[in-house]
Amino acid sequence: MQVDAVLARFFTLSKNRAAAFGPQYVQLWETLEQNTTGGKRFRPKMVLCAYQALGGTDLEAAAYVGAAFELLHTALIVHDDVIDHDFVRRGVPNISGSYRDAATAAGTSERVAEHSGISAAVIAGDLALFNSYRLIDRSGVTDVTRTRLLEVMDDALFASAAGELIDVDFQIAAEVPRVDDILTMERLKTAVYSFECPLQAGAILAGASEEVVTTLGDFGREIGIAYQLVDDLLGVFGVEAETGKTTTGDLREGKRTVLIAYATSTSEWAEVDGLIGNPDLTDEDADRVRELLTTSGAKSFAEGLARYYANRALARLAEPHIPPALRAELHPVADAVLGRVK
């Protein structure tokens, strides 16, 4: 994938530049690069999907824009792990975990080692965030197009920061938020930068009309919400070997999801509430929570809501100004989102 080549060049240049500041700085860039690899490149795929389906042919420019969104994704998940005090991602140490483990191996205390890891992650996330914008600058597009792309990137970051703050507030709220409030948070935190803005960026780069750009944003919003609903379902009911994510982490954290919000209105809630949010939740207790979320109808509700938003997304593609080629490219995206829970 050309996006990988763009990112490889970017990190090579950055590491060469960092060498003048010492081996520790080079190591930070190497660790950041490692945390940028191994993903599905989903956001670049959205950029390229829209761009090529709308007739775009400058794949080098599109690769830079796709890489920009991938680097933005890296920055946001690095900082998200800091917020959540997580030291592992995809089953291996993340940036915080890598630096924490190195400090521990050097003989520092647990508190100092964790502070070292978190500090390194904040710095690395800042670098990824700033340079995601720089990749747009290096795409070689015209000034007008670059300005529009930077505006879309700004929309993505601005919305994600708002969603992250809402999520932080949810975790300390006395009451479980309403379903609608959780959907708003998930749209802002994830859907905007993962679906809405990458699709719009691809359309802008291809020179599409504002009507098409707007409709792609609408499609991205709906399918992004569906995607996050499925992600929350997999976080509790998924198969760890397939998803690479623990299915007890959300329950131990007491994460406020649509599943939990729905369960508050059922007779099973008293027992669910007594189990979740316990960092020492056992596997047996987690199985009991899953059973309760199923019998209460919370699981079925979340699955139905995911289908509802996926269908709303597909309805946007029926607009007459959406070219058949673009429609054909995006239909499988909705199918793939729902297929994750089959």
Image (cartoon, rainbow, N blue to C red):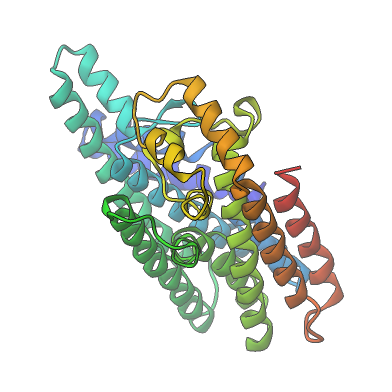
Q: Is residue 18 above or below residue 177?
A: above
x, y percent for residue 267: 51, 47
299 sits to left or right of 15: right
Q: Nearer the viewer, residue 266 or 189?
A: 266
x, y percent for residue 318: 81, 78
Q: Is residue 148 visible?
A: yes
Q: Is residue 58 visible?
A: no
| Residue at image location 63% in from the left, 41% down from the top | 295
Q: Nearer the viewer, residue 125 or 127?
A: 125
Please tell me in which quadrant of the rendered image residue 185 appears: bottom left
Name the image quarter holding the C terminus: top right
215 sits to left or right of 102: right
| Residue at image location 51% in from the left, 52% down from the top | 70
| Residue at image location 51% in from the left, 58% down from the top | 69
x, y percent for residue 199: 62, 68
Outermost residue toward the front? 267
x, y percent for residue 133: 41, 63
Q: Is residue 16 above or below residue 100?
A: below
Please tell me in which quadrant of the rendered image residue 213 appears: bottom right
Q: Is residue 109 above or below residue 65?
A: above
How many discs mark residues in the rendered view? 0
139 sits to left or right of 214: left
Please tell me in which quadrant of the rendered image residue 273 appears: top left
| Residue at image location 40% in from the left, 36% down from the top | 276
